[in-house]
Amino acid sequence: MRKNFTLIELLVVIAIIAILAAILLPALNKARARAQATGCVNTLKTLGGMFALYSEDYNGMIPAVNFDGTGEGFWRYQIGPYYGARNVAWQTRTTELAAAGLRCQTGFFATGKDTVNYGMRTPVVEKPVKLSSIQAPSQLCLAGDAHWNLSGWYDTHLAWNSRPEPIHPRDTSNILYFDFHAAPLPKGKVPGSNSDVFWTGKRN
């Protein structure tokens, strides 16, 4: 004969499930955060490939952060066609870029803003840079995903004097370098000097 659960037994089962959930959810959230961080590294690698294609089409040059001070002058507008984003209006092209995958999911979930949330390194602002002129491309920051500690979520640039606040596990940001490789970098290892090779590309 089957015995029905008593109220006390049911409460005990519910309590056990609640305890297990409390134990497992943080681990699941950490695993999801790590997966998102890996996804952002892969997105940066794809962006590196788009910069490489741009360079092939423009005599070895990398676009400036913003060569003329307009929306159309921003690097993301110049890179847009390589993602299939060709709208003439720069705001729409940026939205198309995000929809095409040029966004860090961690940043997107944190803000809900459907935009390109990667910044390109300055001071490459007013003119493009020739790849062959860089001494240490594997050490020079090209772009990154993060949170600006002074200016909110960015989609334009990052600089030595306004270093990115990490949004990924282990206090890291993902960085794309001028040789087009991408890797996570802990906050404490982002150089705070504008003379560091990370910002200049020049060996000391």
Image (cartoon, rainbow, N blue to C red):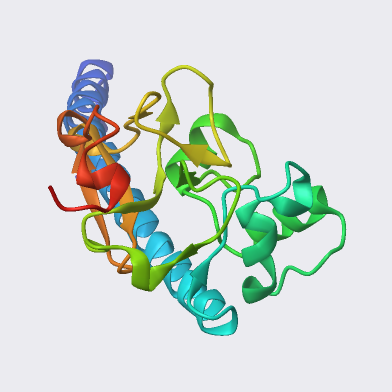
**Tally of numbered tags:** 0
* Res 83 seen here: yes
Question: For this rendering, which residue is in front, 57 or 85?
Answer: 57
Please say if 199 is above or below 86. Answer: above
Q: Position of residue 87 (x, y in %)?
A: 84, 64
Q: Residue at x 87, y 55 (%)?
A: 89
Q: Residue at x 46, y 41 (%)?
A: 122
Q: Position of residue 37 (x, y in %)?
A: 32, 49
Please say if 165 is above or below 8. Answer: below
Q: Is residue 18 left or right of residue 42?
A: left
Please say if 77 is above or below 68. Answer: below
Please say if 144 is above or below 109. Answer: below
* Res 2 seen here: no
Question: For this rendering, which residue is in front, 61 or 23?
Answer: 61
Q: Position of residue 17 (x, y in %)?
A: 23, 30
Question: For this rendering, which residue is in front, 36 or 176?
Answer: 176
Q: Is residue 140 left or right of residue 130?
A: left
Query: Residue furthest toward the left?
Result: 204
Quadrant assignment, res 128: bottom right
Query: Residue furthest toward the right?
Result: 88
Q: Residue at x 36, y 50 (%)?
A: 36
Q: Quadrant of the N terminus?
A: top left
Quadrant assignment, res 177: bottom left
Q: Position of residue 38 (x, y in %)?
A: 30, 56
